[in-house]
Image (cartoon, rainbow, N blue to C red):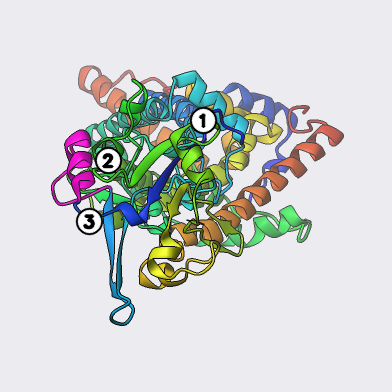
Amino acid sequence: MPQKNHYAFVIDVSRCIDCRACLVACSVENKFPMNHTRIWVHDQGVQGEWPALSRIFIPYNCMHCDTPPCTEVCVSGATYKDKVSGLVLVDQQACIGCGFCVEACPYGVRYIDEKRGVVDKCNACVQRLEVGLPPACVATCLGKARMFGDLNDPNSEVSIALKNAKSVVRLDYEVGRTDTDPNIYYLNLAEMGGVKSSDSFGQVKQAALPREPHYTISEEGWKKVLVPLIAAGMGGAFLVQATFFTKQLIEGEKEFDE
Amino acid sequence: MSDYKNIPLPERRRLRQKMIKKHNLANILTHWFNVASWLLLLPTGIAIISSPRLGITPLWWQETFRNLFGSAANLITFHYTIGFIWIFILLFNVLVGFRRYFVPFAVHRMLLDKDDIQWLMTKPLQMLGFMKGKELPPQDVYNAGQKVYSYFVVLGTLGIMISGPVMVFKNLFPPVVKQIAQPVHFLSVFMIVAWLFIHVYMGAVFPEEKEAFFSMFSGKVSAWYARAHHEKWYWEKIKEEMEWEDEVESQVRESIEGKRASDLPQSTE
C-alpha cells in the first residue's frame, strides 16, 4: 500500500439486526441535516422458500475506495484520497457542491447539502480517529457487526476478523478502466444471502449496488468538447505568434530604419 | 487605399515627431489594472483545476500553488477575492465613464464597417502567404482584428463575471447551475487567452506595432504611426485639428475686428 495507514471497515452481515443505532450515532456525531444520512442499512427483504427463509441487512457507508471515481471528477480537488490515512475526504471549504462526484460515485454514498451548498459524505469520523477513537457507528454498534481498523497492522481487529472469516465479499465495481477496490469487507454475506463466490456480488448487485459511475453532461462536454477545442485554439494562436516571432528574429526589424 | 509608403523622407521625419493622443488616462490605468489582475488570476485559476479526468493542469503546478497558499480552500479564496476586486473596479470604471467613454467607444470604435470586412477577408490570407500584393483597406483607431478580439474579450469577461460568483455563492444556486458555470468559466477564460498570445505579441514584440505598446504608457502615438496603421482615424484627427484651427481663427478674427477693424494681420497661425 502506498499510504501509511490502510483503514477499512469490516462488516459482519450475520450480526446486523437493522437497529439503525449507527445512523443515529453518525447523525449525532457529525451534525448533518436531518433529511440526509451518510450511512444506511440496506434491507434485502425475505429470501428463499419456506422453511429455508433468510433476510439480510447490509450496512453501508462510504467504501473509501483505493481508486475512487469520485475524486477523478472533482474539478478543484476539494474531494481527495488522503495520502496518509487513505480515507476519501471532502474539503467543504473548497467544495462548491456542483455534484460531479455525487453522480460519479458507484455506491451513491454522497449527497448535496443544499443549505450549505456543499457535498457531504462519510469521513470515517476523522475527528475521532485523530484522538484514537473508532468511528461513531462502530463504537455504537450493539452486535459488533461494524468493525474498523488499519489493515496494514496485522494485529488490528479488522485484520484478525478477515483472517478468521469464512467468506469475504467486496462490492467491487470493475468494468473497463474503472476499478474501485472498495474498502468495506463484508463477512458472512455468502452464507446469509446466497452470494456464492467471494468475487461476485450476485444478488447484492442486483438489489442495489454498485451502479455505473455517471458523468454529467457539463463534465463530459468539458472533457470531450471544450478541452480539445481550447487546446486547438491556443495551439493555433501560439503557432501563429511563434511563426511571426521567428520570422522577426531571422529578418530583423525593418520598420524603424527610415 | 493607403499611400503612406510614398511619403517622402523629410515628411516622414516630421510626422514621427508629431504626437497624437490615442488613449486617455482612464483607459491606460484600466488596461494595466486588468493586466495585473489577470497575472494573479490566471496562474491561480489554472492551479485550481486539478481534475485528473480533465487532465489540464500539470501536477507540479497544482502542488506548487497549493503549497504556496496552504490548501486548496485558501487558493480558491485568494482567486475569488482578487476576482471580486477585478469585477468591482472594472464595473465601476464602466459605470462611471458610461456616457462619456463607454457608449461612444461601443458605437464608434467597436462596430465593423465595410473596410473592416475587407480587412478580415484579406489579412488572414496575407498571413498565410497569399495576396501579398493587395493593399489593406484603411483602418479606424482599432483595426478589424482588434475589433473582433474585443468581442471575444467582452463576451468572455461577461462569462467570467457571471459564472465566477455563481461558484462562490454556492448555497444560492442549484447544483445544475454550478455544474454549467464551471465549463463556462473555463471557456470564457481560455477563448480570451488563446487570442492573448497574439495580442501580447503584436503589442509588445512585433516591430511595426511598437508604438502601440508605448502608447499604453504615454497615451500618445506618432502621427506617422497613425498615418500608416490607422489612416481613417488619422484623417479624422487632422479634420478635427483643422476645424479647431478654423474655430480659433474665426474667434481671433472676431475679437480683433471688434477692436480695430482696419488693422488686420495677414494670417494667424
Coordinates of residue A113 in the picture (x, y in percent): 23, 46
Q: Is residue A126 left or right of residue B209?
A: left
Instruction: State the quadrant of the N terminus of chain A.
Output: top right
Q: CA distance from mark 2 to mark 3?
A: 13 Å
Coordinates of residue B232 in the picture (x, y in percent): 51, 46
Mark 1 or mark 2: which comes first in sequence? 2
Q: Nearer the viewer, mark 2 or mark 3?
A: 3
Chain of residue at mark 3:
A
* Category of crowding for the residue at label 1, using alpha-carbon neighbours closer than 10 angstroms: few (below 14), some (14–19), many (at least 20): few
Q: From where the camera sits, is residue A209 visible? A: no
Residue that carries the numbered disc 1 in the rendered image: A155
- Label 2 sits on a secondary structure element that is helix
Q: Please check whether the numbered discs 3 and 1 fall on a single chain.
A: yes
Q: From where the camera sits, is residue B20 visible? A: yes
The residue under the point 36% across, 34% down is A91
Instruction: Please tell me whether residue A150 is drawn above or below residue B140 in the rendered image.
Output: above
The residue type indicated by label 3 comes to: Asp
Q: Which mark is residue A18?
A: 3
Mark 3 or mark 1: which comes first in sequence? 3
Q: Is residue B107 magenta?
A: no
Q: CA distance from mark 3 to mark 1?
A: 29 Å
- Label 3 sits on a secondary structure element that is loop
